[in-house]
Image (spheres, helix red, strand yellow):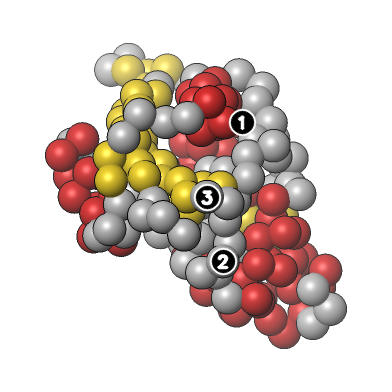
Amino acid sequence: MTSPHFALFDTEIGTCALAWGDKGLVSVQLPSHSPAGLRARMLRSLPEAVESEPPAPVRRAITAIQALLAGEAADLGFIELDMTAVPEFNRRVYAVARSIPPGSTMTYGEIAKQLGDPLLARDVGQAMGQNPFTIVMPCHRVMAAGGKFGGFSAYGGVATKRRLLEIEGALPKPEPTLFGWA
């Protein structure tokens, strides 16, 4: 495989980044403190990556991600993911999570049951925390038991997870307050 490439792109929630290789996307990153911080984070995770202009399939992925983050109905299922470096168990978890449609959620336990062992809920949570394809593999749609948010390893943590679920319609949007949004 040739060295992966990456690009930064603007969205409604800030500058995001993605990296791609010969077989599809290898990383998707949500906003950081700054574009420079995001670029540095991308290069820490993929030190051999080269920043470059995305080819047409990657541009289509960027457009769909931008649409979703702008609150539009956007299906990211067409985006090819290169899971060569992803452990087999995580691949199985991600296949289930990727089937969750926008506006819906599942729990770690429900995914574990679909994998054939309800005792794997904690392992499912760990796989979610290792997700290199944030938003394209929608780990934000996976909740803890009892409607709790659980964790979210992308920048911004649970607040970002909540915001993504609001954008997709899985949670009601907050009501405006006297001083802005709650």
Closer mark to the observer between disc 3 and disc 1: 3
Residue drawn at x 51%, y 33% is 58
* Residue 130 placement (x, y as % from top left): 47, 67
Residue drawn at x 32%, y 18% is 180
The residue where tag 2 is placed is 84
* Mark 2 or mark 1: whose residue is earlier in sequence: 2
Closer mark to the observer between disc 2 and disc 1: 2
* Residue 170 placement (x, y as % from top left): 65, 36
* Mark 2 or mark 3: whose residue is earlier in sequence: 3
In the rendered image, the residue lying farthest to the front is: 2
Depth check, front residue: 169 or 9? 9
Residue 146: numbered disc: none
Instruction: Tell me if residue 1 comes above or below residue 124 in the rendering.
Output: above
Q: CA distance from mark 3 to mark 1?
A: 30 Å
Contact between marks 3 and 1 (CB within 8 A): the answer is: no
Q: How dense is the environment of label 2, judged by Cα within 10 Å: few (below 14), some, or many (20 and up)?
A: few
The residue where tag 3 is placed is 22
For residue 137, side relative to residue 47 (left or right): right
Q: How dense is the environment of label 3, judged by Cα within 10 Å: few (below 14), some, or many (20 and up)?
A: few
* Residue 71 placement (x, y as % from top left): 56, 21
Residue 168: numbered disc: 1
